[in-house]
Structures are given as C-alpha cells and as structure tokens.
Image: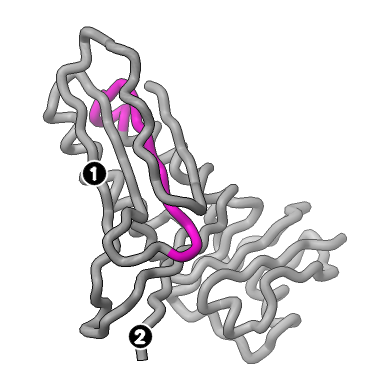
Amino acid sequence: MKIKILTFAQTRTQLGFDEKDVECHAGETPREILHRLAPQFDPGKTVRVAVNQEYADWDQPVGNASELALIPPVSGG
Amino acid sequence: MKTHIEFTRSVIVPPATSPVMREIGAVLEFSGVVRESENGEQIPGLRYEAYEPMARTQLEKICAELSAKHPCEEIWFIHRLDFVPVGEASLFIRINARHRGPALALMAELIDRLKADVPVWKTSNVLH
C-alpha cells in the first residue's frame, strides 16, 4: 500500500519535501516509515505525528491509513 | 452551538453580527494582531501556514469539547494564512453566549488550545 507523507514548517526544511507517496505495509509504524525514508531525521520529543488527520503514536502501526503528517510545535494565533 | 471556522488568505473581515437572538447577553470578540517585533527584531509581518483539513477537524473537536464545559451559543473563528503585515489581524474570534462567564472562559481556553494543538505555524520575515 501507499501512504502520503506530509511535512510542515521546520520539518519541511529538514526533510526537503512537502509531500511524498511512500510504499509501506499496515504493520509499520510512523517511526519505521520515517526512518526508512529519512534515516537522519529524528522527531525527538517535539515533533508529533498525525495519521489521517488525528494525532497518533509514533509507535502505533498505521493500519490502512492514507496520510501521515509530521507536526512540529504549532504556533498559530 | 453553532461553529463557523474559516481560513483566509486575505484581510480578515469580521462577519456581520448574527441575527438578533434575544437570549444572547454576551458578545465577546478577540483579534490577534501582528506586532512589529519578534524576538527583539523588527519584522514586516508574519507568514502563517496550516494543515488546513486537520486544523479544521481539531478546531471543531476543541470547540465542541469547550462548549460542553462553558455553554455558549455561537463561535466564529477566522485565521489568516500566508503573509500578514504588522498591524493587521492574523486571528479573529467572536463568541456569542447568554452570559459573560462562559464566553470569557471559552475564549481563553480556545486560544490556549489553538496555540497547543491546532496545526498552524508562523514564521517571521526579519528586516535586514
């Protein structure tokens, strides 16, 4: 299956793309998918992940989700 | 409760006042305006971006959750995106409620939650 990876703000700068379709399987976690795509990228404790537009756990399998977004610290307002 | 959520790339125009509802006793408005300095440096404005579909979903959830805690009748939420010059509003919120207490409490918590959980980001364009 394919999942779309979205990046915003500083994560877009760090990873060098704003969206990318990546092959994965349902048992993979966001952390594993990201590590395969960009081994140098470490989300640390500040970058959250959203799966299908809901905050999710970096270590929870993505299932059949279609979208995975990296959410650096937000600063709206 | 009615919730209106909007993201715009142009100057925020506050919506017309809602039709008269005789039980509304509090109309509370907040504008977040871009200041001329950021981290001690002069800036021409701020640039905002959002993950819009998720921001909208998050805001709907947050408004529903907060209005269960602080009963209000209507929330208008408008966030401007792209470049916002100094002196112009990046954010407008209006809350209509029967009483001021829930309106004030909801307003404060909504802004706190926006700044913690809603995927919107700003970057400054520093003058050099």
> Which numbered circle lies on residue B73?
none
Query: Is residue B77 on the magenta stretch?
Result: yes
**Looking at the image, is A5 positioned above or below residue B17?**
below
- Residue that protrudes farthest toward the top in the picture: B22
Give neighbour class at mark 1: few <14, some 14-19, many 20+ (Cα, 10 Å): some
Find residue B87 and report its horizontal and vertical position in percent.
Answer: 27, 61
What's the coloring here?
A: one colour
Query: Is residue A18 on the magenta stretch?
Result: no
Find residue B91 and report its horizontal and vertical position in percent.
Answer: 34, 50
Q: Can you tell which of label 1 and label 2 is closer to the viewer?
A: 2
Name the kind of residue labelled 1 in the image.
Phe
Find residue A20 and report its horizontal and vertical position in percent.
Answer: 76, 70
Residue name at image x 25 percent, y 81 percent: B39
Dividing the picture into quarters, in which one does residue A17 lie? bottom right
Instruction: Judge if badges 1 and 2 mark residues of a common chain.
Output: yes
- Which chain contains the residue that carries disc 1? B
The quadrant of the rendering that contains the N terminus of chain A is bottom right
- Which chain contains the residue that carries disc 2? B
Find residue A28 and report its horizontal and vertical position in percent.
Answer: 74, 67
Q: Are marks 1 and 2 in contact (CB under 8 Å)?
A: no
Q: Which residue is mark 2?
A: B127
Number of dots carrying numbers? 2
Give the magenta range: B67-83
Foreground pick, A19 / A66: A19
Distance of label 1 from label 2 (alpha carbons): 28 Å
Query: Which element is circle 2 on?
Result: loop
Residue name at image x 30 percent, y 66 percent: B86
> Which numbered circle lies on residue B30?
1
Q: Is residue A49 left or right of residue B78?
A: right
Residue name at image x 23 percent, y 38 percent: B29
Foreground pick, A58 / B20: B20
